[in-house]
Image (cartoon, rainbow, N blue to C red):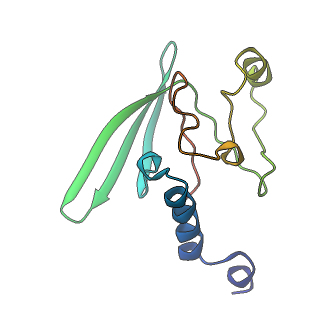
Amino acid sequence: MVLQRRFGTTQWIREWVEGIFLRGGYGRLLELNTTVERCEKTSDEWVLTLHKEAPGNNYWWRERFDALVEASGHYNVPCFPNIPGLVEYDERLPGRVLQSEHFRSASSPSGKVGKWLHTLGDF
């Protein structure tokens, strides 16, 4: 219970994250209650197999992404994993390696080439 009082309940965190997306106009970019069932690296992209269950429905689909990084951090300080070549990639293509702190409007990163995936965790 001490952790819940200090950091909030799972429900509170979920509502907080949803609120940020909805207030900022990101609603169309947010996919909740979805699991990443499989990640496959092809020659130039990642193919993710996604799964969402709802009462009476069972959705499976695939989406393609230019990059896939599991990155967690403390508040607005990003913590990216030590992936060989990630720094060089970011230097070569600035603005492609992003953390949630970088998203300030619904238009970013739309208009840029490719797709991004940001995983918030198991809420």
In the displayed structure, 29 sits above or below 83; it is: below
Total marks drawn? 0
Residue at point 58% right, 56% down? Answer: 121
Image side of residue 66 versus residue 59, left or right? right
In the displayed structure, 37 sits above or below 9; it is: above
- The location of residue 79, given as percent across then percent down, is 78, 44
Image side of residue 38 versus residue 82, left or right? left
Residue at point 52% right, 27% down? Answer: 111
- The location of residue 94, given as percent across then percent down, is 73, 22
In the displayed structure, 1 sits above or below 63; it is: below
- The location of residue 34, given as percent across then percent down, is 41, 52
Image side of residue 75 versus residue 46, left or right? right
Residue extending furthest toward the left: 56
Quarter of the image that includes the N terminus: bottom right
Image side of residue 109 versus residue 7, left or right? left
Q: Relative to the observer, which residue lies in front, 50 or 65?
A: 65
**Can the viewer see residue 75?**
yes
Quarter of the figure with residue 67: top right
Residue at point 27% right, 62% down? Answer: 54
- The location of residue 70, given as percent across then percent down, is 64, 41
Q: Relative to the observer, which residue lies in front, 30 or 87?
A: 30
Q: Relative to the observer, which residue lies in front, 37 or 8?
A: 8
**Can the viewer see residue 123?**
no
